[in-house]
Image (spheres, rainbow, N blue to C red):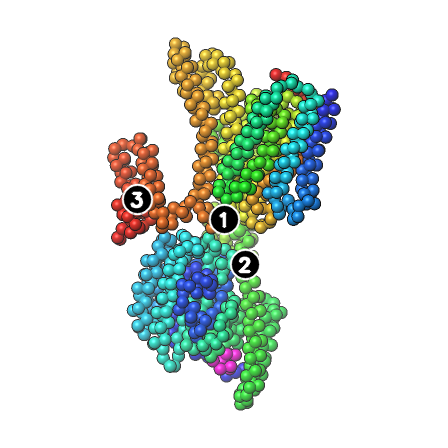
Amino acid sequence: MREAEIRRLLAANLLCALAIILTAVVPAIFLDGFSVLGTHLTWLCVCSVCVATLNVILHLVLKANQSSKRSSFAHKISRFLKCCIYFFMSCILFHAIIVLYGAPLIESVTETFLFAVLLSTFTTLQCLCMMGPNIQAWIRVFSKNGAMSIWESSLQITTVCSILGAWFGAFPIPLDWDRPWQVWPISCSLGATFGYMAGLIIAPLWIHWNRKQLTYKSR
Amino acid sequence: GVVSNWTKIPPPLFKKVVIVLIDALRDDFVFGSKGKQFMPYTTQVVEKGTSYSFIAEAKPPTVTMPRIKALMTGSIPGFIDVIVNLNSPALLEDNLIWQAKTAGKRIIFYGDDTWVKLFPKHFVEYDGTTSFFVSDFTEVDDNVTRHLDRVLKREDWDLLILHYLGLDHIGHVTGPNSPLVGPKLREMDNILKKIHISLLSKEEASLPNLLVVCGDHGMSETGGHGGSSEGEVHTPLLFISSAFEKRSAPLAQPERVQQTDLASTLAIGLGLPISRNSVGNLILPVVEGKTMREQLRFVHLNGFQLSRLLQENTPAYEKDPGYEHFKIAEKSHGNWIKLYLEGNNSEILLNLGKKVLKQYLEALKTLSSSLSKQVAQYDMYSMMVGTVIIMEVLLLLLLSVPKALSKRAEFEVPLSPPLFSLLFYLMCLMLCAVHVIVCTSAESLCYFCSMSWLTAVGVMMLISALMCGILSAIAKMFENSRLLVKNPVVSSSSWSEIDMLILAGTIGHVLSLGASSFVEEEHQTWYFLINTLCLVLCQELCRNNFLLKECDPQHSTNVKQNFDTIGETSECENIDIPAAGNSKLGKATSSSEFTKGSDKWISLAAPWIILICCRLLRSLNQTGVQWAHRPDFGHWLTSSEHKSELSFLAAVSLFMIFFLVQRRCSLVSKIAMALGLLGVYSYRAAIGNVVFPWQHGSKDVSK
């Protein structure tokens, strides 16, 4: 059972990674002059939308397998609205943190906001899909030894990796190499993307490596 | 070959020479848009008058004292002169000023007192201005200009040197793009106009006068200097004299010459022997008014001096390509003289002479460059001794750091055991032997060898003592770790996340100093690391506070049971529980819950307030090199339209300082501090940075 679930996790993660790679390549066919570095804001939108839809679809499919209790339509709508509000608030929070890190407040608002949206898709959207708009559950998952399933471990790893990737992506900004990828926010968003993809690949491998020590006690 | 019968030094070409040295004059301040806008007279002379303009390239370090030495001796001083820059002793090398004084010329100097220190007894009259008050832009130049009218009327001088510091000070304080540069350039232009008109009016028919305008170094984009960027090394060099022909074609781009060329050019212009160590070439257009025979004589003199310098410095001088070219040119010169003395005064002779001149000039250029290449001679022995001492001290500090940063905070360097050990004496003897060997066999001058024997022995003893100290510290460390392995009772403290982050951040910051961009933008590294630290702190606080909420009932029972151990644990418990008996415990726990609530929110909000303050700081003042020109809050406040906002902010800040500090002061201290702060505000109002509320508009309080 455990092995099967790890394999399912691996498949889902690889699909996500492939989707991100496709978002870099495929729109060039449809749109003129599209490139990741050149039309970066377009790419950010496309990537966020693709990753979001893919994640939502994946979790709907997987949750449909583990049939949960039936809830009323109104409940579902309220949950959905709450999810949207939480997602939006997390975008605003990320935007505020990035501005506190030094991004300009008045200029380049679009770039900063789209970068915040990207970060939120990589982190908050996963939490929303997996556990719903339940902040206590989020805090529990991100505390030490709080993960209750391998999906939650994978969530921990991908979130931390994408945030670390964004953090490391800020390093080349003060260098005076005058490269096109040093324009704000390209280096940070590319760092976040690479971090996320690395997390997607590392998570199943790490879980596989440590499957003997990982005991998920149910609280 | 044939030797001409001219053996004396040629006579001077100019009667009076005025050198105007404007500190930190960058080439675009004269030739660029700023020059055309703010220096109209100079631009007119450069474009249409009887002048020659060049861009002189200075060699680093572009600091004033080495540049003055380069201008006057023609040699290239090295970086060690920067250390001596603050307390420059007299210049003992052969230089233009000494040659002028020996030949009986009368030299008057007004300007930076570095010259007075370099040439203590050479000036007939001088007035040195100090260069330390960097915020003074006007008085330092007025002190030079006040003598100008008087001295221009007098006839009793041959060489007048003026050194203006105002532009340099403006650059250091406000940068090259500030609005203060324009008026200063206009002031300099007026001075040049005054001098030029006076020189023209007092000119005699026999010998013309010469006005030289130059800079000692330029200015970088941020207003400083010292390095080798484009703006710092390119300075303008203007020669203005009625001996030159009027410029017919407009100036396209001034020619590039070396700063060291000025010494040899001025020596020939004043009829003096060229300084011995000069590596510069004669700037030919300055002597173009003379006959071909005289011009050839001048370049021959210069080449002879350079080849003699080469002979002294290089054993294999004959193989040097510059030397060979010079010998060839000399032979052609001899042939030309023969033809000239035969009486052929035709066009062919003139063209031949021009060819010989060209050969000479190429030879001079090659000789100069081969001489410049060998200037850097490093004193390896002294450098090694210094490096060894520094590395030893560093190693000793690193070994003592774990103990110094631990709870007991002790810093102990065990010196007495080493000093009585055999190793110490053996090392001393060996080092002294090495010192003797090196010093007796050194060909070049060595700083360490020139120190007295007692000092040298002392230094050797220091090196040995440090080495023994290091060895004993390492031995003690191994002993301790072996003890630790034997007794596992002693537990090392566990590293929390924040400790790891601080350690990694410090190491990362040190490593980043290896890249020049990160050194220039070091403040970005600091802001970044502080932001990360605050966020991690925030995360830990949230975790402690929100997780603790779940085990609250357990916590209050713990409070009742473990009364004494509360004060030392985690941050959410910043509660003041009075040390009272059990009867008060009930009240204590309820008040502790109350204080816990507000304290908790304060401690949760604190990192965010720090983050917001840091972000405000960032936009208050843009520093660094890449983004220094971006507009920031500081620029907005200090621009002249927002003086009232600045005054208000300054007043509020001073009042806050008083308010926060006055609680712990006695009455006398309070009054003294209030008067002091009032004095600060009044000083700023007197300068004109802020205004008093009853001063509408920006009128300065009269001096």
Amino acid type at mark 2: Gln
For the C terminus of chain A, the image quarter is: top right
What stretch of residues is rendered in magenta? B290-296
Give the residue drawn at x 56%, y 44%. A184
How far across and how far down the image is residue A70, in percent? 65, 18
Whether residues under marks 2 and 1 lie with C-beta atoms below 8 angstroms apart, the answer is: no
The label shown at residue B377 is 2
Tally of marks: 3
Name the residue carrying label 3: B681
How far across and how far down the image is residue A179, in percent? 60, 49
- Mark 3: which secondary structure? helix
- Mark 1: which secondary structure? loop
Name the residue carrying label 1: B627
Give the residue drawn at x 43%, y 75%. B50
Q: Nearer the viewer, mark 2 or mark 1?
A: 1
Q: Earlier in the sequence, mark 2 or mark 1?
A: 2
- From the viewer's perspective, is A79 left or right of B262? right
Q: Chain of mark 3?
A: B
The label shown at residue B270 is none
Give the residue drawn at x 44%, y 21%. B597
Amino acid type at mark 3: Tyr
Q: Earlier in the sequence, mark 2 or mark 3?
A: 2
